[in-house]
Image (cartoon, coloured by chain):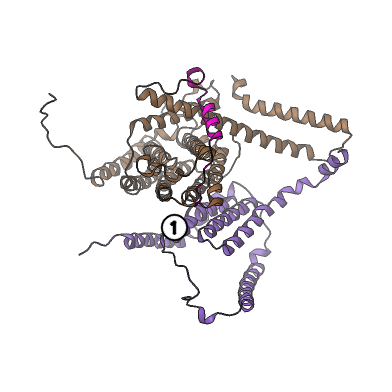
Chain colours: A brown, B purple
């Protein structure tokens, strides 16, 4: 199955070959002599363009699919059909949505700050589209190899905060500003545990490069367990923390209170309509895919197969399978959990997530210095479990247990 | 057409990366100037953020990848948001001409411009002399190596500069606790 494994890279080389052949044929035909080193440079630029187009294509198609599949899955979980009118099984619903969004009137409030209101969706979507660039999609398939790729990822997350503020403030609407404030408070609060749990993976792998972190998770220990970080006590804790942080960063339910429609209309999106709204929507979903991709990279072994006998499936298929599972789980969580209240959300971030991420960091360090064996496993489990139980018992002491009740009529 | 393509391909394209750094540099200067010149405080803060971003990109373009990313993370993620929140949460303190505390020092525009220019020139002159006469400026520029600096910076932080690092950590923790204390609502006794 070497052919499938190399298919994306082979396709790119094939396109590059065509470009080179066409260019040299044109030069001969027009009698142009190219200077030394021009052709390799041109091909370099073309290969960058191919990677950009491929990434955009893949992520936009995933966004379109997700927008319909999410509604289908939500529908199934709530005992209804979901969209099923446009095309087979409602699969062309995104096309209909896109046409609807494009043809809608673009309303801008007269009292809005016109320039900032216009720039906010752009400032939102540029970081989101830049996020997927550093993820390792397969063996030798890293679009941009950065030595500190993890930092790059969180830098772009910081850019999103500014964009949300721009959207909320420029709308000149109290619901918008309140929604933006909530969104920024949520992002800043959950960014700390998110970054801390990413630091744990970087600490154990000894590198900030996503590909290096994937490489550090190769192989199998104890004969059966893959070396993925999620299968260690500290890695499991960090993975859960990162997952919750990812839910909060991408404004997914149960952390969707910045746009809590029952109280804030739509938060910072209140005054956006038509295609600008669609752009915010798209940025949110692409950000969700990218942060799930980072979760796969950091804790779920990236593009690696769980067992050696499954390695005939191409590495990039494994990456996207894990990504699809995580995206599905986020829909599942959305169908299951009710929305947080704002004080619950902040308390959870600062009193539980942040201390637990520090504990996981200490546990990972202990695991490393205890030799990464079975004993280390036990030590790190104790370091994780004891604070977890203590925090759970003493931090959230206000138990809401119902009193003993006698049902009078329902028996 | 033929001549145009011939001329275009003959341009010094291999030096393009060296010239590309002019884009973030120019953007940074423009945004910084706009941050000073704009009337609306929020617009100024957003322009300042843009200037921070351009500075980070400039670092990255010059090969200091780690410093650039940290600049973006700290300045765009934290400092810019801090400035914006500070502007939003403080009551609008428009200094009108009548209650301007510096009214008695009000001078003509020309004198103002000369004084401001002199201060800027003094600061810039100080910076330039500090940079040009430091021994590091004379040292050979090490070739940018993408992978090494992160590990090197980490090693240096935890060996040579461990004490200042710990001191900073204590200072920041104290500041955080102090901020929480100040922000905490006082219960009426």
What residue is shown with label 1?
A: B85
* Residue at position x 63%, y 76% in the image: B118
Residue A98 within the magenta-colored segment of the rendering: yes
Q: Position of residue A180 (x, y in %)?
A: 43, 48
Decide if residue B120 is on the left or right side of residue B76: right
Which picture quadrant has residue B130?
A: bottom right
Residue A197 within the magenta-colored segment of the rendering: no
Q: Which residues are magenta?
A: A86-111
Which picture quadrant has residue A385?
A: top left
The secondary structure type at the circle numbered 1 is: helix
The answer to which of A24 and A229 lies nearer the viewer is A24
Q: How many marks?
A: 1
Decide if residue B3 is on the left or right side of residue B47: right
The answer to which of A270 and A301 lies nearer the viewer is A270
Residue A151 visible here? yes
Q: Position of residue A269 (x, y in %)?
A: 46, 43
The answer to which of B120 and A103 lies nearer the viewer is A103
In the displayed structure, would residue A249 be above or below residue B61?
Answer: above
Q: Position of residue A313 (x, y in %)?
A: 53, 21
Output the chain of dot 1.
B
Residue at the far top in the pictured view: A88
In the displayed structure, would residue A332 be above or below residue A133?
Answer: above
Indicate the quadrant containing the N terminus of chain B: top left, top right, bottom left or bottom right.
Answer: top right
């Amino acid at each position: 199955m070497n052919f499938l494994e190399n298919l994306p890279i082979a396709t790119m080389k094939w396109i590059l070959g065509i470009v080179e052949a066409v260019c040299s044929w044109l030069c001969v035909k027009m009698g142009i002599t190219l200077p030394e080193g021009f052709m390799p440079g041109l091909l370099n630029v073309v290969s960058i363009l191919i990677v950009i187009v491929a990434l955009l294509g893949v992520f936009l198609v995933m966004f379109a699919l997700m927008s319909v599949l999410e509604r289908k899955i939500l529908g199934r979980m709530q005992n209804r059909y979901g969209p099923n009118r446009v095309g087979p099984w409602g699969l062309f619903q995104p096309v209909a949505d896109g046409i609807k969004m494009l043809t809608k009137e673009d309303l801008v409030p007269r009292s809005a700050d016109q320039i900032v209101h216009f720039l906010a969706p752009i400032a939102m979507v540029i970081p989101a589209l830049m996020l997927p660039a550093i993820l390792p999609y397969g063996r030798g398939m890293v679009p941009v190899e950065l030595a500190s790729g993890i930092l790059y990822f969180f830098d772009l997350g910081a850019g999103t905060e500014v964009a949300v503020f721009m959207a909320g403030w420029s709308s000149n609407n109290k619901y918008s500003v309140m929604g933006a404030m909530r969104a920024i408070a949520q992002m800043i609060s959950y960014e700390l545990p998110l970054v801390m749990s990413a630091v744990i993976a970087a600490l154990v792998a000894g590198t900030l490069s996503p590909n290096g972190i994937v490489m550090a998770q190769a192989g199998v220990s104890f004969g059966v367990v893959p070396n993925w970080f999620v299968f260690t006590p500290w890695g499991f804790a960090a993975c859960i923390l990162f997952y919750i942080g990812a839910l909060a960063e991408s404004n997914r339910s149960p952390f969707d209170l910045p746009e809590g429609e029952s109280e804030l209309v739509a938060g910072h999106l209140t005054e956006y309509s038509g295609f600008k709204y669609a752009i915010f929507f798209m940025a949110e979903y692409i950000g969700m895919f990218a942060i799930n991709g980072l979760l796969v990279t950091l804790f779920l072994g990236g593009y690696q197969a769980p067992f050696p006998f499954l390695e005939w499936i191409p590495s990039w298929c494994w990456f996207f399978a894990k990504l699809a599972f995580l995206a599905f789980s986020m829909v599942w969580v959305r169908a299951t959990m009710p929305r947080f209240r704002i004080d619950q959300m902040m308390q959870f971030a600062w009193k539980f997530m942040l201390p637990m991420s520090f504990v996981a960091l200490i546990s990972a360090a202990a695991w490393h210095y205890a030799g990464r064996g079975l004993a280390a496993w036990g030590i790190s489990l104790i370091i994780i479990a004891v604070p977890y139980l203590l925090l759970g018992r003493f931090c959230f002491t206000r138990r809401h247990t119902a009193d003993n009740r006698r049902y009078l009529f329902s028996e | 057409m033929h001549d145009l393509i011939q001329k275009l391909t003959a341009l010094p394209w291999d030096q393009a990366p060296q010239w590309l750094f002019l884009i973030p540099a120019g953007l940074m200067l423009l945004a910084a100037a706009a941050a000073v010149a704009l009337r609306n405080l929020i617009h100024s803060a957003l322009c300042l953020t843009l200037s921070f971003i351009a500075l980070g990109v400039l670092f990255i373009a010059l090969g200091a990848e780690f410093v650039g990313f940290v600049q973006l993370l700290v300045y765009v993620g934290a400092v810019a948001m801090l400035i914006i929140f500070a502007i939003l949460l403080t009551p609008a303190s428009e200094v009108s001409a009548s209650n301007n505390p510096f009214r008695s020092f009000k001078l003509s525009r020309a004198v103002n411009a000369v004084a401001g220019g002199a201060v800027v020139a003094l600061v810039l002159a100080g910076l330039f002399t500090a940079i040009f006469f430091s021994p590091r400026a004379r040292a050979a520029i090490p070739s940018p190596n993408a992978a090494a600096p992160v590990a090197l910076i980490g090693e240096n932080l935890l060996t040579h500069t461990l004490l200042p690092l710990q001191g900073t950590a204590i200072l920041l923790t104290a500041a955080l606790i102090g901020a929480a204390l100040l922000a905490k609502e006082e219960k009426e006794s």
